[in-house]
Amino acid sequence: MRIVARLKKLDEIFKLINLGVDVFLVDTPLTVKSINKNLFDSLNDLFVYNKPVYLLVNKIIHESDLVNLNKILQIAKNKLVEGIVCNDITVMVKARESGVENKIIYQPGTMNTNSYDSEYFFTKNIKGITISKEITLEEIIKIFKNKKTEFSLVGHGFIDMFYSKRMLLTNYFIYKNITHSKIQDNYYFHLNEEKRPDNYYPILEDMGGTHIFRDKALESFNELDILKEYLDDFFVERIFLSDEEYYDSLLAYNDNTFVPDFLKKYQEHYNKGFYYQYTEKIKGELDEN
């Protein structure tokens, strides 16, 4: 199993390697929820470290994006680029035209939830798929046992549960006739739901649309002991986390003796997501109320 970390700056590479990182996930011009798109222009500087690189292409693709997409796919022919992480089937189609479909990791968020996904994408000759986090640990393991292609999981950090190409925050401020100095790429907005008054969901609008995240970050320290038997890649998400917290999380995944210290320090904004909770049960309970 490889630990995949999002790279934020070149001068942290050796630190991340020492923390057990196996693969660097790098933003591209077609990355939403980005942390540093400028890194794409420094790929040659990254390649000198001779470490595997994944390129993140998680924007909903439109015709106006095809020039950038083709550029990214040409760069992906470099042997050090071992993966193209995407959530739009268009990327897979264009990758096939460029001869790099075997580097595609299909990561559509909430959609890969059954064993047939593995069977179907195996026929497409792609590298692998990322399983949804909206299903239980038991269900994930059942899918993993029917392995046809590489499996991955985003197992740590703030997980997005909604993505729309619409500029919902901008439209909201227009509707409310509110002026704000910075709406797009503002990482401090939160959404509060009437039925869950104590929960605040991070909401981000960027050039690709609007993204809503779970109110708590996900941690998988105990579960990884079970999952690593089946996983090829374990993604550690970084958005909304400080550098210190991100480094501490990688340290804890690399050496579980540090897990108690991590949880003592950061536990208040982490939970287990849906590992042990069926989503339909949650919805049913809300309906009854």
Image (spheres, grey):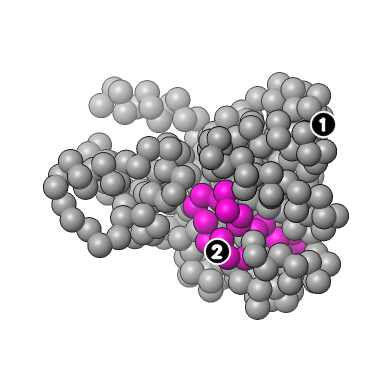
Around disc 1, counting alpha carbons within 10 Å, would you say few (fewer than 14), some (14 to 19), or many (20 or more)?
some
Report the side of 70 relative to 147 (left or right): left
Residue 105 seen in the figure = yes
Q: Which of the two residues, 4 or 266, is positioned nearer the viewer here?
A: 4
Q: Amino acid at mark 1?
A: Asn
- Label 2 residue SS: loop
At horizontal 61% and vertical 55% (from top left) the residue drawn is: 28
Compared with 84, 140 (above or below) is above
Report the side of 89 relative to 208 (left or right): right
Compared with 235, 164 (above or below) is above
Over which residues does the magenta segment extend?
A: 19-39
Residue 158 appears at what percent x and percent y? 49, 52
Sequence order check, earlier mark of 2 and 1: 2
Residue 60 appears at what percent x and percent y? 53, 38
Q: Amino acid at mark 2?
A: Asn
Disc 1 target residue: 125
Residue 49 appears at what percent x and percent y? 80, 71
Q: Which of the two residues, 24 or 248, is positioned nearer the viewer here?
A: 24
Residue 287 is covered by the magenta coloring: no
The numbered mark at residue 36 is 2
Residue 23 is covered by the magenta coloring: yes
